[in-house]
Amino acid sequence: MQRELRRALDTAYSRLKDGRAEPATFASHYALGLGIVAGGQACGGMTEEEAAGERAHLGMLAALFEVQARIRIDSDAR
């Protein structure tokens, strides 16, 4: 994977890991990450295997965000 592409993805990932982000903010950072992966693959900056791994990483971060949001909702209800 190209170094610039890796740096862009790492920046997007760091923004996605903000546990207090609003859903709209998270969604925009998620979309940015997907766009980086799609663009990187389209221009030959990453292989299919690398792209699949990055999409899986994005999916894991999305699942983690949903779990954290549910925990916040449940704790606020108490």
Image (cartoon, grey):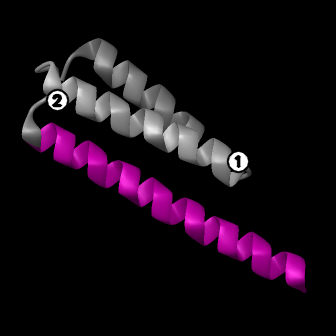
Taking the spot 38% from the left edge, 57% from the top edge, the residue there is 59
**Does 28 appear in magenta?**
no
Question: Which portion, as a residue range, is magenta?
Answer: 49-78
Residue 61 at x, y percent in the picture: 46, 54
Mark 1 — residue? 21
Q: Which mark is residue 46?
A: none
- What is the CA distance from the residue labelled 1 to the residue labelled 2? 28 Å
Q: Which mark is residue 41?
A: 2
Q: Is residue 52 left or right of residue 8?
A: left
Q: Amino acid at mark 1?
A: Ala
Tag 1 and tag 2, C-beta contact below 8 Å: no
Taking the spot 67% from the left edge, 75% from the top edge, the residue there is 70
Q: Amino acid at mark 2?
A: Gln
Taking the spot 10% from the left edge, 21% from the top edge, the residue there is 44
Q: Is residue 69 left or right of residue 40?
A: right
Quadrant in which residue 65 is drawn:
bottom right
Above or below residue 34? Residue 11 is above
